[in-house]
Image: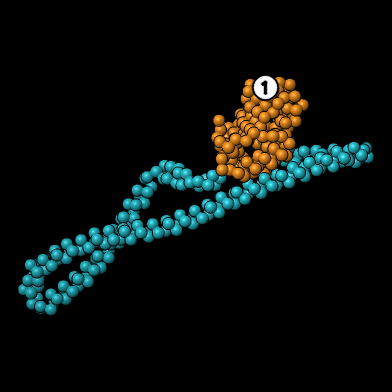
Chain colours: A cyan, B orange
């Protein structure tokens, strides 16, 4: 069998030879007709089977597409939730540090910086300006702290994800079921 | 003749013929890049098998999850050649068609091939696992 239609080609070649030699009989024509009918019937059944299996694949592909869209949507929501959670945790940490820094600055200003400025410079409003500048600076410092913590947390998550074995879900297109596969990253 | 085995791959089925028991197994998925090349070895084997005169009764167990159109044509040719060979050698041929319980498509496919071959199949709904 050198190609898929070897049988059909053999039938045609054999009959062609008889035509070329003008040696075909009525029996040969009947045989050829029967063979042709047989091949046609075979093709019809095969097309029917192929269409059926193609339909099954199409259904499976549609299911995969729907599942993928569902996974992408859920993944986006999950990422958003994780991001918000991470920001909340980081914000809390930054606020704690800021609160501590504010108390330390306030105490040091009241005990050391304020009296020193009053003693050497003597302008009371300069202390107010200094306090205002420190308050504005602390707000910026809080944003910087938050960014540092967010970046650190993201790096940590990426590092953990790379070191853990990956678990992927595959969809069995023919059985219509989900199965899990684990692989080392 | 020696036994004949082709190990399965993601695109090709498990094919095995035990010369002692006369059992041919054809199981798995079949969508090779070139079905003719893949199945030619099976067809050649059975062409030889019936020529040697050693042929005994044959049982064919088919349990396919999926096959493409080219594979279908090749599988049908294999079944037809074995049927013709068995008839000429006056041997009995039994074809068992395995399918998953809820897989109506594969059951109907077996019925279509059975009708085309003009031969009764035995249908088994207990799955297509390789035994």
Location of residue B70 by image quarter: top right
Q: Quadrant of residue A36?
A: top right
- Across and down, in percent, residue A71 comes to 45, 54
List x then y, in percent, for residue A117.
9, 73
Q: Which residue is at 42% across, 56% downward?
A: A75
Q: Eyeballing the image, is A134 above or below A47?
A: below
What is the count of numbered marks? 1
| Image height of A59 relative to A138, above or below | above
Give the side of residue A168 with respect to residue B130, left or right: left
Give left or right: position of B28 versus B51.
left
Q: Nearer the viewer, residue A87 or A121?
A: A87
Give the residue drawn at x 54%, y 44%: A175
Q: Nearer the viewer, residue B114 or A80?
A: B114
The chain to which mark 1 is attached is B
* Residue B3 visible here: no
Give the answer, above or below, for where B33 lies relative to A89.
above
The image quadrant where one finds the N terminus of chain B is top right
Is A128 drawn above or below residue B53 in the view shown?
below
**Residue tagged by mark 1?**
B1
Q: Badge 1 local density, few (<14 within 10 Å), some, or many (20+)?
A: few
Which residue is painted at 56% across and 50% down in the image? A60
Residue plotted at (31% across, 59% down): A85
Foreground residue, B129 or B73? Answer: B129
Q: Position of residue A56 (x, y in %)?
A: 60, 48
Residue A56 visible in the current orientation: yes
User: In terms of secondary structure, where does tag 1 sit?
Assistant: loop
Q: Position of residue A51 (x, y in %)?
A: 66, 49
- On-image quarter of the C terminus of chain B: top right
């Amino acid at each position: 069998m050198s190609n898929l239609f070897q049988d059909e080609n053999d039938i045609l070649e054999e009959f062609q030879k008889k035509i070329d030699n003008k040696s075909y009989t009525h029996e040969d024509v009947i045989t050829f007709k029967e063979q042709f009918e047989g091949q046609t019937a075979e093709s019809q059944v095969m097309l029917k089977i192929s269409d059926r299996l193609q339909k099954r694949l199409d259904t499976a592909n549609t299911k995969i597409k729907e599942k993928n869209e569902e996974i992408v949507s859920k993944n986006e929501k999950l990422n958003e939730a994780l991001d918000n959670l991470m920001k909340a945790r980081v914000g809390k940490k930054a606020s704690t540090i800021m609160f501590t820094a504010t108390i330390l600055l306030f105490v040091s200003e009241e005990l050391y910086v304020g009296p020193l400025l009053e003693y050497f410079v003597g302008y009371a409003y300069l202390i107010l300006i200094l306090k205002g500048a420190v308050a504005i600076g602390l707000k910026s410092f809080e944003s910087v702290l938050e960014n540092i913590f967010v970046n650190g947390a993201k790096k940590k998550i990426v590092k953990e994800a790379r070191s853990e074995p990956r678990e992927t879900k595959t969809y069995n297109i023919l059985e219509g079921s989900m199965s899990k596969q684990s692989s080392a990253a | 003749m020696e036994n004949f085995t082709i190990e399965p791959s993601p695109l090709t089925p498990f094919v095995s013929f035990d010369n002692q028991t006369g059992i041919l197994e054809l199981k798995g998925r079949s969508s090779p890049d070139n079905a003719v090349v893949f199945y030619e070895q099976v067809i050649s084997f059975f062409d030889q098998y019936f020529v040697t005169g050693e042929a005994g009764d044959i049982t064919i167990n088919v349990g396919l999850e999926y096959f493409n159109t080219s594979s279908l044509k090749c599988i049908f040719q294999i079944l037809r050649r074995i049927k013709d060979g068995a008839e000429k050698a006056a041997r009995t041929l039994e074809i068992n068609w395995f399918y998953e319980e809820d897989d109506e498509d594969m059951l109907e496919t077996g019925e279509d091939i059975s009708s085309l071959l003009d031969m009764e199949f035995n249908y088994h709904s207990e799955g297509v696992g390789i035994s």
